[in-house]
């Protein structure tokens, strides 16, 4: 079997197509949640923190150095934890919404009541023997 025919067989599987659709929808969903966080959640947090944007939060290890003319000679060295915080909030919101969606999906997709399992033949035979001995 050639590589091209193996590739065609691989692509034709339903799982690959389902995975591709999931990735595309996930990327679009990620953009929606990022817009929610950037446009609604973070401005509220920034307002509560005194008007400073969360992405600007940082811990300066070494301030920038300026020369006499006011030009920057050495760049500032800082730990920018605000960007990390914003990304972490994005992640938590995406995970929470996916959890809620899957929880609703699983409720809608309740498994059908399983039919009682058929009694094995040996058990039926033993019951018949028991009943005949009782007589």
Image (cartoon, rainbow, N blue to C red):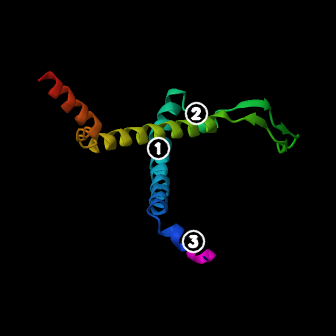
Mark earlier in primary sequence (1, 2): 1
Q: Position of residue 94 (x, y in %)?
A: 47, 42
Q: CA distance from mark 3 to mark 2?
A: 52 Å
The residue that label 3 is drawn on is 7
Q: Mark 2 falls on what kind of element?
A: loop
Q: Residue at x 47, y 33 (%)?
A: 44
Which quarter of the rendered picture does the N terminus lie within? bottom right
Q: Which residue is mark 2?
A: 52
Q: Say above or below: 14 vs 66.
A: below
In this image, 31 relative to 106: left or right?
A: right
Q: 103 and 3: which one is in front?
A: 3
Q: Nearer the viewer, mark 1 or mark 2?
A: 1
Residue 53 is at least partly visible in this image: no
In the structure shown, which secondary structural element does the residue marked by tag 3 occupy?
A: helix
Count of marks overlaid on the render: 3
- Write the residue at 59% across / 34% down: 85
Residue at image point 79% right, 30% down: 61
Where is mark 1, residue-wise? Answer: 39
Residue 88 x, y percent position in the rendering:
57, 36
Which region is colored magenta? Answer: 2-7
Instruction: Answer with the quarter of the image where residue 59 lies.
Output: top right
Q: CA distance from mark 1 to mark 2?
A: 14 Å
Left/right placement of residue 23 relative to residue 128 reads right
On the picture, is 31 further left or further right than 80? left
Of mark 3 and mark 2, the one earlier in the sequence is 3
Q: Residue 8: image x %, image y %?
A: 53, 73
Assign a secondary structure to mark 1: helix
The picture quadrant where one finds residue 74 is: top right
Quadrant of the frame with the C terminus:
top left
* Image position of 39 with respect to 125: above or below: below
Could you classify mark 3 by the number of other residues whose Cα lies within 10 Å: few (under 14), some (14-19), or many (20 or more)?
Answer: few
């Amino acid at each position: 079997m050639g590589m091209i025919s193996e590739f065609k067989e691989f692509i034709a599987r339903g799982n690959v197509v389902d995975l591709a659709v999931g990735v595309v929808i996930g990327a679009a969903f990620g953009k929606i949640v990022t817009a929610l966080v950037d446009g609604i959640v973070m401005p509220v947090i920034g307002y509560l923190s005194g008007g400073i944007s969360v992405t600007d939060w940082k811990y300066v290890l070494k301030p920038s150095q300026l020369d006499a003319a006011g030009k920057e000679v050495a760049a500032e060295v800082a730990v920018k934890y605000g960007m990390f915080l914003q990304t972490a909030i994005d992640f938590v919101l995406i995970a929470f919404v996916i959890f809620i969606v899957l929880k609703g999906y699983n409720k809608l997709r309740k498994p059908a009541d399983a039919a009682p399992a058929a009694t094995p033949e040996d058990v039926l035979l033993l019951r018949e023997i028991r009943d005949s001995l009782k007589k």
